[in-house]
Amino acid sequence: MKKHVILLLALTIFSCSPNPETFIPHINGYWEIDEVTLHDGSKKDYNYNDTIDYFEINDSLTGFRKKMKPNFLGTYETSKDAETMQIIIENDSLNVYYKTPFAKWKETILLASTSQLKIINQNKDVYLYKRYQPLDLEGINKN
């Protein structure tokens, strides 16, 4: 009887894990790093970012990630460099395969919602992003 209860409990816990396919609609857009938890458990908080990441994924689950630099005019400065990417669901994980002329690598999306994006890289470093909110300079000038 004990074995059945333990098995039922384990199945319940593991069946509640989120479906990684539900993350896909939330990935597109501008994201800034909030904190990084390194593989050794230490954390690095990012109070200010002079660059943000822009993700764009199309219906074929391919796209790119690009570093953007917001400016005070509400636009972005960027180079022509971009990391092409392909998203593949494998073993109940949402994996992102990146490619540049210089390297190829894989990261796994652990969470993607309207406000947060959590990615783990091959070094086991976890990046927590928050959705980028541009500065509201008009609101500042009204006060």
Image (tube, grey):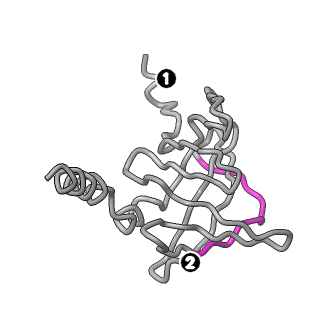
- Specify whether 84 is left or right of 18: right
Relative to 15, say whether 89 is above or below: below
Q: Mark 1 and mark 2 in contact (Cβ < 8 Å)?
A: no
Q: Which of 23 and 106 lies nearest the eye of the viewer?
A: 106
Quadrant position of the C terminus in the picture = top left
In the rendered image, residue 84 lying in the magenta stretch gets the answer yes
**Magenta stretch?**
75-86
- Rendered residue at 56%/35% (across/down): 34
The residue where tag 1 is placed is 141
Residue 117 image point, x, y percent: 48, 49
- Rendered residue at 61%/42% (across/down): 73
Q: Residues within 10 Å of mark 1 (few under 14, many from 20)?
A: few
Q: Give the quadrant of residue 127.
A: top right
Residue 62 numbered mark, or none: 2
Q: Give the quadrant of residue 33.
A: top right
Q: Secondary structure at mark 2?
A: strand
Residue 70 numbered mark, or none: none
Identify residue type, mark 2. Thr
Count of numbered badges drawn on the protein:
2
